[in-house]
């Protein structure tokens, strides 16, 4: 009898202690801690509660199913996508790196060039940029409604006057951009931008991000296009050869007479030849897996830096063991940006020397053309590194290769100018 009583007391005591831990944990650590107590291993893709649901009716005028339409089926995903509003800071690159204004002289980026805000600001920011944006092609990656317009109407949509097209746009980057109307099929990724299919044909399916890429506007149709036709040609060298072959320039700079190229956010191309290309995809490092109160596991659609998210940092450890990732990445980025500043300033000095030679008018035509070509190439390789947003974290080897190549062209050009 005594023994039984003691056992019962012990049991009750134990239950009280466990309840106290759970309760206090909940109060002190919030809901997450309670959930974490029940989970001993990090979330993996196998835990994702892929819910296949029937597509809701589209309420947008153009037939795209918008975020609000999906809210009943995928509340967590819609809510986290909305959280991209939090990403509202802007770094003014022209202030940060004054040499840029000189290099970009004569082009829109010399007027305004800041870091992009989150996907919830795309329409507002494209409408208000100080850079010229006469045509609808500037809307290509800013809204699903324009992608749909191109899909419905064809390439003529790119030449619609900007304001006319803007009036038809309803959403910032949203579900249709990445999933078409097929998010209900376990979040299937769909190529919704016709230029991807046109450029890469059967390879298009491999394109994960359709927008974080290098592109240009075709001279005839002003159509958005990728400058390659295979994954192998996604290098700065091959892309330059592509532009050279079609004698393409984004602008001709008055002071130097050089036909110049402007690179744009080549995150995908850079990532592809990097160390993680065969191991991970963009979502693995920028969309943490999260667990809702009802146990639903999903990819957060708030796009974040892996350095600012515990879950993502924990996932690095699978391969990087106990390396301090924040420190490791920051050191790498610092090496890249230091070198960038060095080469950027040298490029700016090269531009001044070339402009002076053009002004003096005492150089032979052929010799001048050779220096202009070297300046075009130096600017291209520098830019390819500068405008890639991970500052070396996606692929430091490529970043340094670009900067070294730019420097080599600068030195060659300066020698021809007798400097
Ligand atoms: C910028 C691109 C992008 C946008 C915008 C986007 N998604 Fe996703 N979505 C993804 C990616 C990437 C994945 C993960 C794919 C994978 O498994 O690697 C994903 C996964 C999903 C999944 C599968 C479940 C999961 O969590 O992995 C669903 C369902 C989904 N998205 C629905 C939506 C809905 C609804 C919207 C609009 C509110 C939306 N997505 C907006 C890119 C996007
Ligand atoms: C191995 C992890 C990893 C993968 C995979 C990865 N990235 Fe990144 N990405 C990073 C890191 C690290 C940074 C730098 C973050 C920082 O500076 O805080 C970064 C930065 C970025 C930025 C700049 C963010 C900002 O706030 O300026 C963009 C955009 C980006 N990545 C897009 C992509 C795209 C698109 C893909 C797929 C093609 C991709 N990333 C794949 C790790 C990754
Ligand atoms: C599936 C394995 C794997 C995961 C997960 C992983 N990495 Fe890596 N990472 C690698 C490998 C392999 C290398 C190449 C190592 C080498 O060359 O010494 C690498 C290299 C890197 C580099 C150097 C890249 C360069 O080009 O110099 C950075 C930065 C990096 N990882 C960041 C991250 C971050 C941040 C995460 C987590 C968000 C992460 N990695 C997750 C496998 C992984």
Image: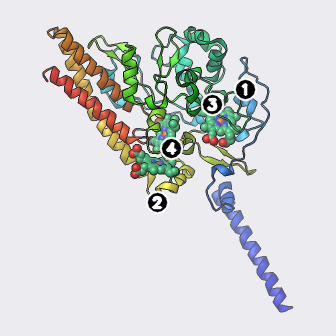
Label 3 and label 2: CA atoms lie apart by 34 Å
Which residue lies at the image location 26% right of the left edge and 34% below the top edge? 342
Residue 352 x, y percent position in the rendering: 22, 19
Element type at marker 2?
loop
Which residue lies at the image location 39% right of the left edge and 40% below the top edge? 392
Residue to which mark 2 is pinned: 322
Which residue lies at the image location 44% right of the left edge and 57% below the top edge? 323
Element type at marker 4?
loop
Along the polypeptide, which appears first: circle 3 or circle 4?
Answer: 3
Residue 151 appears in the figure: yes
Label 4 and label 1: CA atoms lie apart by 32 Å
Quarter of image, res 258: top left
Residue 216 x, y percent position in the rendering: 46, 19
Give the number of marks: 4
Label 1 and label 2: CA atoms lie apart by 43 Å
Q: Residues within 10 Å of mark 4 (few under 14, many from 20)?
A: few
Residue to which mark 4 is pinned: 278
Residue to which mark 1 is pinned: 65
Element type at marker 3?
helix
Between disc 3 and disc 1, the foreground one is: 3
């Amino acid at each position: 009898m005594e023994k039984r009583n003691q056992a019962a007391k012990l049991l009750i005591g134990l239950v009280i202690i466990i309840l106290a831990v759970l309760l206090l944990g909940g109060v002190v650590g919030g809901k997450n801690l309670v959930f974490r107590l029940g989970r001993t291993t990090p979330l993996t893709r196998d835990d994702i509660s892929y819910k296949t649901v029937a597509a809701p009716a589209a309420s947008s005028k153009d037939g795209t199913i918008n975020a609000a339409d999906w809210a009943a089926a995928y509340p967590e995903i819609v809510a986290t996508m909305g959280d991209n509003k939090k990403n509202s800071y802007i770094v003014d690159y022209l202030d940060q790196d004054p040499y840029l204004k000189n290099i970009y002289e004569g082009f829109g980026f010399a007027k305004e060039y800041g870091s992009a805000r989150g996907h919830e600001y795309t329409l507002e920011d494209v409408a208000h940029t100080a850079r010229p944006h006469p045509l609808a092609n500037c809307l290509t990656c800013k809204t699903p409604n324009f992608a749909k317009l191109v899909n419905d109407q064809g390439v003529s949509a790119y030449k619609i006057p900007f304001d006319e097209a803007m009036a038809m746009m309803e959403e910032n980057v949203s579900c249709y951009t990445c999933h078409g109307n097929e998010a209900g099929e376990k979040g299937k990724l769909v190529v919704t931008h016709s230029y991807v299919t046109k450029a890469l044909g059967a390879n298009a399916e491999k394109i994960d991000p359709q927008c974080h890429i290098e592109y240009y506007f075709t001279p005839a149709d002003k159509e958005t296009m990728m400058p390659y036709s295979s994954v192998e040609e996604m290098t700065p060298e091959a892309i330059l050869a592509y532009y050279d072959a079609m004698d393409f320039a984004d602008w001709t700079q008055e002071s130097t007479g050089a036909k110049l190229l402007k690179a744009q956010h080549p995150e995908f191309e850079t990532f592809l030849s990097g160390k993680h290309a065969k191991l991970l995809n963009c979502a693995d490092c920028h969309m943490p897996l999260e667990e809702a109160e009802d146990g639903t596991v999903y990819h957060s659609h708030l796009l974040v830096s892996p350095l600012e998210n515990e879950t993502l940092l924990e996932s690095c450890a699978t391969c990087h063991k106990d390396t301090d990732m924040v420190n490791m990445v920051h050191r790498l980025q610092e090496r890249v940006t230091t070198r960038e500043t060095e080469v950027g300033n040298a490029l700016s000095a090269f531009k001044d020397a070339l402009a002076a030679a053009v002004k003096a008018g005492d150089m032979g035509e052929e010799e001048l053309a050779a220096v202009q070509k070297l300046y075009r190439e130096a600017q291209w390789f520098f830019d390819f590194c500068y405008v890639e947003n991970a500052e070396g974290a996606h692929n430091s080897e490529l970043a340094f290769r670009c900067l070294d190549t730019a420097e080599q062209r600068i030195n060659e050009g300066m020698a021809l100018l007798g400097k």
